[in-house]
Image (cartoon, coloured by chain):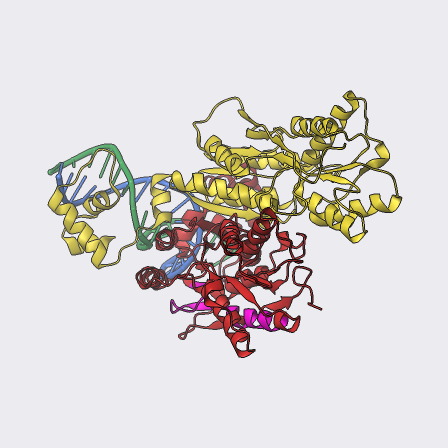
Chain colours: A red, B yellow, C blue, D green
Amino acid sequence: MSQVAQEAGVSLATASRAINGSANRTVRDDLRERVLAAAERLRYSPDANAQAMARGRTMSLGLIVHDIADPYFSSIAAGVSQAAARADLAMTLASTQHDATLEPRFVELLTRQRARAIVVAGGRLQDDEANERMRRALQDFRRSGGSVALVGQPLLDVDTVVIANASGSADLARALHGRGYRRFAVLAGPEVHLTARDRNAGFSEALAQLGSPVDPDLVIRSAFTRDGGYEAMSTLLAAGTDVECVFAVNDVMAVGAIAAARDAGVRVPDDVAVAGFDDIVTLRDITPALSTVRVPLVDVGVMATELALAPESVEPRLVHVDGSVVLRESTPGRT
Amino acid sequence: MSQVAQEAGVSLATASRAINGSANRTVRDDLRERVLAAAERLRYSPDANAQAMARGRTMSLGLIVHDIADPYFSSIAAGVSQAAARADLAMTLASTQHDATLEPRFVELLTRQRARAIVVAGGRLQDDEANERMRRALQDFRRSGGSVALVGQPLLDVDTVVIANASGSADLARALHGRGYRRFAVLAGPEVHLTARDRNAGFSEALAQLGSPVDPDLVIRSAFTRDGGYEAMSTLLAAGTDVECVFAVNDVMAVGAIAAARDAGVRVPDDVAVAGFDDIVTLRDITPALSTVRVPLVDVGVMATELALAPESVEPRLVHVDGSVVLRESTPGRT
DNA sequence: TTGTACGCGTTATCAG
DNA sequence: CTGATAACGCGTACAA
């Protein structure tokens, strides 16, 4: 930049003000033009790191997800990316590949980068030690001047977008009950996974209230993934129990479950109905069309980003996002 | 950091060397321990921006994609993320939302950030002006010390991972021909989209060589998206032509096409067969299972990253990645 | 092995 | 409105 100043015949200060503006200083038009022309000629590119240091704040935002290849997270990432761009922030993306110990590590990384804000997506686990480590890492980040928003369970004392997992699956349960289903099974995901747990609990409790409690033997645990769904469904079918409707705690698992049914020669929905959760866009065209609970994931990403970027508040804020039941062919009405 | 030095009773230089190592300087063990303890006590966190400035290089890598919510790109992003993490680099993700004018903008952003390297994913368009702008932006970035790798067509004078689109779809054409199909239609995507064009061309040329040329009227143009596939298939079906097999130039379009067929009361594959390209993981469980050309997208992301990070070469390097035909139920053998 | 002092590129303060 | 100069936090020649 000193070269630019020299080329334009002005001081560094003036060049700086001409190029990157300044609070209430202004530059005479002819000088500004000269500087800009010189910058263009020299292909000058301001150094964001130096600006960050001088200004004391960066223009970047961090996003931490479990797995960016998972459509759930990539949808949220799309929302975050969009909102970040609108706020003129670059997005640093960290994907933990489901390794929870990496989460606080990434928070530390973003702390070193002096990111403006961090958005953490992905449900918490029931692991007090891990949560505590994460809480501390986030607190250190905030102490260093950054702000934070979470998508998931409001456990870490920060602003959180809370998806109504329990009430969404309760709504789904009632809708399915309304279609005449009585004997349910649940592909419940991992015991320690709080999102999975909330969805399972909401579903089961609603059914219990309706007088059709889920047989505990028909609550199958497995991974929160497509393969987990496949495996759990296989287990269920192998047991040979007579089930009318299977609820998988997310769409990806539901898809795995449908695949398992097909491979076992069991027809969906004729022999067994299947429902999921999330309404993943990429999966809207599967056959049979999947009944599910729609969660506006892109909006969730946007909201989380806006929450993180909003002026600090003393009390952690909570934003609740409801899901809406979408019934499709995978759970036809029983006649 | 000066506080840490003071707390430990050493100079700034010693503190720096103790904390972040140094080329061939070493620090006495007891001093190092004192410094590290002081750093811990004061919750010291090195400022990556300041380090970047002092060292003259950052620890971050940029990735530019068209749409992070698209499984094609999120798979590549997963690979890039993984390779970047292995190289101890943070990943800055930019999603253009299909706005080509944003691409060079993001390159400029990453230039300002002084990113080590940039990976650009997403096929080029036939738009000389846009390509030229992008080429210039990338050259400026390289002149500023960064390296670049592209996924797509080798048009921008930089290292490129080239996906064998033409030969992959030619292989697919031959395989489908071998299964007895003769009357084909192609959902060809946008005319200016080079990836779409290569796939269409490879497919059509192979068929022509086999003596079953595709009727030009049955090459339908539409967007490179699910909705584009739906629309093109609807058009095709409305025309009422008798087609045995439809090739959509990507899986997402193929899924749209299958949906359109279903909505039109046309059965897949009984009435018409459908094939795609990419073998998107999330779509492996759709019904009927989709015949396609498998592209190892995660690996492509890894390779592009490694290419970008490899020592500079004068000549742009090209890495070719082949796809492999996967025939499934959507294109059964004709008896 | 340790400490001193300068430079990295920019903004902000303060004096002209 | 403009210019000189001191920060910002760190790495590293150079000197001790």
Frontmost residue, B94 versus B325? B325
* Displayed quadrant of residue A83: bottom right
* Whole-percent x, y for residue B217 in the image: 86, 35
- Above or below B194: residue A139: below
Q: Nearer the viewer, residue B48 or B308?
A: B308
Q: Which residues are magenta?
A: A148-175
Q: Quadrant of residue B66?
A: top right
- Place residue A35 in its image quadrant: top right
Q: Determine if residue B23 is in view.
A: yes
Q: Is residue A9 visible?
A: no
Q: Nearer the viewer, residue A144 or B75?
A: B75
B322 relative position to A135: left or right:
right
State whether residue B245 is above or below residue A110: above
**Rendered residue at 63%/49% (across/down):** B97
In the displayed image of the protein, which residue is found farthest to the right?
Answer: B240
Nearer to me, B80 or B141: B80
Where's residue A141, x and y in %? 36, 60
Relative to B117, say whether A245 is above or below: below
Q: Position of residue B318 (x, y in %)?
A: 55, 25
**Is residue B124 left or right of A312 when viewed as pictured?**
right
Asked if the magenta segment contains residue B69, the reply would be no
Q: Quadrant of the C terminus of chain B?
A: top right
Residue A161 sits inside the magenta stretch? yes
- B201 lies above or below B251: above
Count of numbered marks: 0
Q: In the rendering, at what x and y percent does residue B240 appear? A: 88, 43
